[in-house]
Amino acid sequence: MNKGDLISAVAEGAGITKAQAGEAVATVFGAIQGTLKSGDKAAFVGFGTFSTSVRKARDGRNPLTGATIKIAEKTMVKFKAGKALSESVN
């Protein structure tokens, strides 16, 4: 499923136009992104939790030359599936 498929499913399920569904999906994604950017978690009971963690700076190796390189610190997005979602997939 991609974003277009999600918009179509929301439009059909809610009985709204694809344009309205597109705005709704964009708003949901924007709200989650804003929450994560501020350092908070976005938790949806039964679905899962989006959160962030910081990957510390470290040394890496260029596979072509073998030279040591510095890899910068980076904030990573994590998702942990909720119990209901996990059980529905199994």
Image: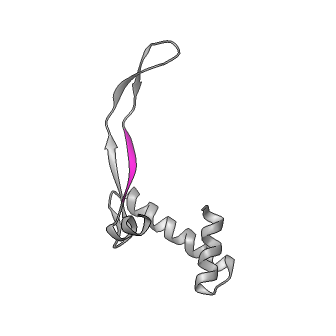
Residue 88: image location, x then y, percent: 41, 69
The front one of 37 and 42 is: 42
Q: How is the image coloured?
A: one colour
Considering the image in quadrants, where does the C terminus appear? bottom left
Q: How many marks?
A: 0
Q: Specify the quadrant of the image occupied by residue 18.
A: bottom right
Q: Residue at x 33, y 73 (%)?
A: 45
| 47 is higher (above) or lower (below) than 80 | below
The span picked out in magenta is 74-80
- Residue 70 among those drawn in magenta: no
Q: Quadrant of residue 16?
A: bottom right
Chief secondary structure of the magenta portion: strand
Going 35% across and 72% down the picture, which residue do you hit? 46
* Lateral position of residue 58 relative to residue 9, left or right: left
Q: Residue at x 64, y 67 (%)?
A: 5
Where does residue 33 sit, x and y in percent of width and height? 45, 60
Residue sitting at the far bottom: 15
Q: Position of residue 43 (x, y in %)?
A: 34, 68
**Quadrant of residue 20 in the image?**
bottom right
For image coordinates 64% across by 81% down, the residue present is: 12
The N terminus lies in which quarter of the figure? bottom right
Relative to 69, residue 4 above or below: below
